[in-house]
Image (cartoon, rainbow, N blue to C red):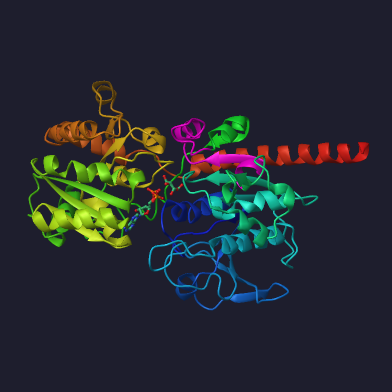
Amino acid sequence: MTKILFVTSEAYPLMKTGGLADVSGSLPIALKALGHDVRILMPAYADTLASLGPLHAHHVPQAHSQLDILEGLLPGSDVPIWLVAHPGTFDRPGNPYLSPEGKSWTDNAERFALLSRVAVEVAMNRVGFRWKPDIVHCNDWQTGLVPALLGDEPKRPATVFTIHNLAYQGNFPRAMFRQLGLPERFWSHHALEFYDQLSFIKGGLVYADRISTVSPTYAREIQGKEFGCGLEGLLAQRQDRLHGILNGIDEQAWDPARDPYLPHPFEASDLSGKTRVKSALQKRSGLAQDAKVAVIALVGRLVQQKGIDLVIDVLPQLLELPLQLVILGSGERKYEHALEQWTRLYPDRIALTLGYDEALAHLIEAGADLFLMPSRFEPCGLNQMYSQRYGAAPIVRSVGGLADTVEDASAENLAAGTASGIAFAEAKHEALLQAVYRALELFHDKPVWEQIQRTGMNKDFSWHKSARQYEAVYALAEQDCQALGHSMLARGALA
Ligand code: ADP
Ligand code: GLC
């Protein structure tokens, strides 16, 4: 049994802006099921507190302000959760990183430095919990300072840092480095400095005993220039400590046979319910209730990462085809605006919902025939796994986790019975269009289509295998941490 402190800035259902929340809300449960003692540490956002009942507050002594850790359970589980409450810091409603104007909160560096400092105190068993983890598992830049700050502590726990998205690095001006009072020796390109800025993510990449990312392909990609975001050199240098572990999905929350958001349940052996859900989705979306026309869906953040610009560019050609588009998302205003305009012109062909809607996301995955995910890069991606589980074959660009989770409907894969979607290589208009043409051809070939659907629905996307891989990485991190401790002791003895 390993004691794991899982530090994150979001966890479903307490706070979610993307896949990090899905992972943080399900991996700890899978680890607990393997017999480990896992506790989650995250900020006490206003909306998080509003969704929970009264919690036990544990006061943490601090010089100038009130700092509490609120104790509860991750809803629907027996995984303990500790919420860092600090007036004026985390208790704002809405998005955890962005103000209502869509700009980063100006004090994000201070906010997530505080989360990281509290994590260090908890990790060193200095807040009175009488619990010291063996492993501190950090996630994304918001927790990047934890491995750096813990590095100074004698008898520290081992650290693992997971990259969910290397493009978000938590970079701040040099003045912030001073303002946070970080040790001077961290101001070096071997440490937290990145082109004259303070980089939170480097704290994880440089100092964690082990680094992981959320798919094997992305683990390779980030060691190269195209996907490395300037950090490829560092990652290549630490490649013997870098692991690619595919995300799992919460198979209970995403189960077409038991999903409370669906008007009709269905499963691989009987897809009649799916036909009815498709009709319900078309009705709700104001589209013709026609079983023969392909419904292509897109759910996600409307940002360049997801290739939404490619989709918008090829809309004129897509709209010449016999298909309906159902889109749910929010993101950059320019993409939202372009989609709104197209929807106004073609209200009988495009159904657009701007915003965040968990229930609708489930209905769309279940009612769609095809699911579009032409990402420019994708560390893992969860939607393509949800869609396969729900019998909506994904059309994906072969990058990152998309390459690792979708088997293209090539003649070979079709013959082998492994095809579960349509993959294309280049982030180019023509490649995307060719993939859609191919998808529609397959869709109209019913026996082949049903085989693709069933193959996707029967795939194992559970956490079990991945949680075992994290166990192995934790063991390696503990070995590295011990070895480092010994060598430091030896050096101290020599000095
Ligand atoms: P990322 O984390 O890069 O946004 P993922 O595919 O890993 O991408 O995870 C996205 C998660 O957020 C999925 O659970 C997806 O269903 C959900 N999601 C994204 N946008 C929306 C939205 N507008 N409404 C509901 N759920 C959404
Ligand atoms: C990030 C990535 C996404 C991944 C998610 C969870 O948001 O963009 O690909 O699935 O984290 O790891």
Left or right? Give the position of 203 relative to 121.
left
Check the image and report above or below for 281 versus 14: above
Foreground residue among 468 and 50: 50
Q: Is residue 240 magenta?
A: no
- Residue 115 sits in quarter: bottom right
Residue 310 x, y percent position in the rendering: 25, 41
Q: Is residue 209 magenta?
A: yes
Residue at image coords 23%, 31%? 431
Foreground residue among 175 and 456: 175
Residue 411 x, y percent position in the rendering: 23, 22
Q: How many marks?
A: 0
Residue ranking furthest to the right: 494
Residue 134 x, y percent position in the rendering: 70, 50
The quadrant of the picture occupied by the C terminus is: top right
Instruction: Answer yes or no: is residue 75 visible.
Output: yes
- Residue 481 sits in quarter: top right
Stretch in magenta: 204-230
Left or right? Give the position of 294 relative to 333.
left
Check the image and report above or below for 417 versus 472: above
